[in-house]
Image (tube, grey):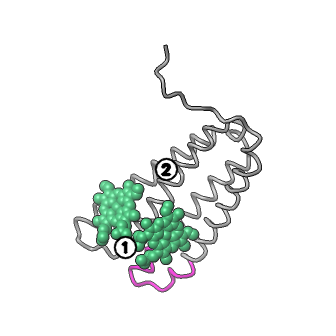
Amino acid sequence: MKASSLSFQAAVVFVVIGMVWGIVMAISEDHSAMPAHAHLNLLGWVSLFLFGIFYRLHPSLEGAKSAFVQIWVWIVGTAVLTVGVGLVHSGHAIGDPIAAIGSLIVLVDMLLFGWLVFRRASADPVIQPSILPAE
Ligand code: HEM
Ligand code: HEM
């Protein structure tokens, strides 16, 4: 599997969960877990999909172990942060250290992604997506 495909697939899984959660929040009229829903969608759907686009544009990273590590750590960090924030906002103090660990995981992982962007991608020819239909 390519790194971009893993990113896109994980993003879709997260957003389906996030959307169901959003609908449940709306129906129940209990928005207390809103920050957990928001970060599940923003870290899980938006960020992972953006990572996927980046990897698709840099083919030398598509099979790189560092890219797969970056994506898997992000998946784990997003899940940990979401559970932690969800617990905090549903009145469970135990969620605090869990949210803290999740936030540190995604922060460190963003530094890894930043390293890939600065070090690896600068040496890689960027594939320009064509805006013109194929002849
Ligand atoms: C079926 C789809 C979705 C439903 C039904 C839904 C529902 C909700 C609800 C009920 C809230 C609480 C609003 C409030 O209390 O002010 C909320 C907040 C939020 N949602 Fe969703 N959501 C959906 C999808 C998404 C997606 C795909 C994203 C991100 C791409 C997203 C990002 C957010 C954010 C950032 C907030 C916090 C907004 C704020 O700060 O006021 N949601 N959503
Ligand atoms: C280490 C990662 C992150 C941490 C620890 C973090 C933490 C927080 C905190 C503490 C809040 C206030 C929540 C509240 O009102 O109770 C917040 C709100 C928000 N953050 Fe983040 N954030 C992170 C990453 C991100 C990212 C990557 C995005 C966007 C892509 C984002 C978008 C938002 C938005 C839209 C809000 C307002 C909606 C809400 O209250 O949940 N955050 N964040």
Q: Main secondary structure of the magenta part?
A: helix
Q: Residue at x 49, y 13 (%)?
A: 135
Span colored in magenta: 84-98
Magenta highlight on residue 96: yes
Q: Residues within 10 Å of mark 2 (few under 14, many from 20)?
A: many
Q: Which residue shows up at 37% across the image and 73% down it?
A: 33
- Amino acid type at mark 2: Ala
Q: Please tell me whether residue 133 is drawn above or below residue 114 in the rendered image.
A: above
Q: Under tag 2, what secondary structure?
A: helix
**Type of amino acid under label 1:** Ala
Indicate the position of residue 47 as horizontal and vertical percent values.
53, 55
Q: Is residue 83 visible?
A: no
- Residue 126, by quadrant, is top right
Q: Residues within 10 Å of mark 1 (few under 14, many from 20)?
A: some
13 relative to 58 in the view: left or right? left
Say left or right for 135 vs 24.
Answer: right
For residue 65, above or below residue 93? above
Question: Mark 1 sits on what residue?
Answer: 33
Closer to the chain start, of discs 2 and 1, is 2
Does residue 30 sit above or below 120 in this rendering? below
Q: Residue 9: percent from the left, percent from the top?
A: 51, 44
Q: In x, y percent, where is residue 104?
A: 63, 71
Figure quadrant of residue 124: top right
Task: Answer whether residue 115 is magenta in the image.
Answer: no
Say left or right for 14 vs 31: right
Q: Is mark 1 within 8 Å of ligand 1?
A: no
Secondary structure at numbered mark 1: loop
The x, y position of residue 117, in whole percent, is 69, 50
Q: Which residue is mark 2?
A: 11
